Image (spheres, rainbow, N blue to C red):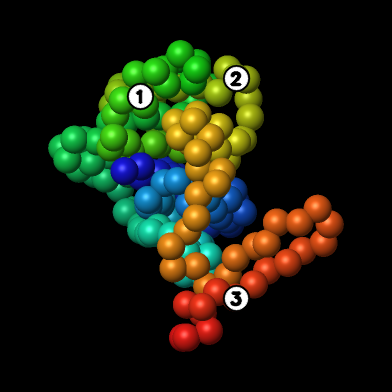
Amino acid sequence: MIIILRIGHRYERDERLSTHCGLVARAFGARRIIFSGEHDAKLMESIGGVAERWGGPFDVHYEGQWKKSLLAHKKKGFTVVHLTMYGTPVQKAMRIIRKRKKLLVVVGSEKVPPEIYQLADFNVSVTSQPHSEVAALAVFLHEYHKGKELSKRFRGAKLRIVPQEKGKKVIETRSRKRA
């Protein structure tokens, strides 16, 4: 099980990036995202609505205190992976991380508290260069799943894209038609 902890969400400043963190988390195989920082009901409803329409087991939660959530997950046996540009390169760390089945992946927003680096079991970098936390999350999950998440089918989907070379085609599935 992979859970994403998005720390330091700021309502006005991070709405789009936090939304994309949630969308990437779901599409790339995480089970849940937990937001901390400022409470943003609209953000949570938006991501929850995507999961409802496009399927898959995915939950959206809010926890006002990121540290409380992190420590609670550690108590439950989760390995804490902090995505940062200062950590061990993802390609090197992944050999060990992939053996862990319960991950709490921490993705920052505002400046990450230094304490995170000490609490994390792994500080992992993607490129060791400044970049987007959304990109780091996508690359990390892709590496963890060895690319298998790209062909994943989402249970309970009400909508499904039909891949095609040109144009867009979205169909309603039976579960939507019955509703």
Q: Are marks 3 and 1 in contact (CB under 8 Å)?
A: no
For marks 3 and 1, the one nearer the N-term is: 1
Q: CA distance from mark 3 to mark 1?
A: 37 Å
Q: Residue furthest right?
A: 166
- Give residue 30's position: percent from left, percent from top: 41, 46
Nearer to the camera, 102 or 163: 163
155 in relation to 141, above or below: below
Q: Residues within 10 Å of mark 1 (few under 14, many from 20)?
A: some
Badge 1 is on which residue?
A: 97
Mark closer to the observer (3, 1): 3
Badge 3 is on which residue?
A: 172
For marks 3 and 2, the one nearer the N-term is: 2
75 in relation to 38, above or below: above
Nearer to the camera, 88 or 95: 95
Residue sitting at x 63%, y 29%: 131
Q: CA distance from mark 3 to mark 2?
A: 39 Å
Residue sitting at x 63%, y 25%: 130
- Would you say residue 68 is visible in this rendering? yes
What amino acid does circle 2 point to? Thr
Badge 2 is on which residue?
A: 127
- Give residue 52's position: percent from left, percent from top: 47, 69
- Give residue 114's position: percent from left, percent from top: 38, 25
Q: Number of labelled discs?
A: 3
Q: Secondary structure at mark 2?
A: loop
Mark closer to the observer (3, 2): 3
State left or right for residue 95 relative to residue 136: left
State left or right for residue 44 relative to residue 173: left
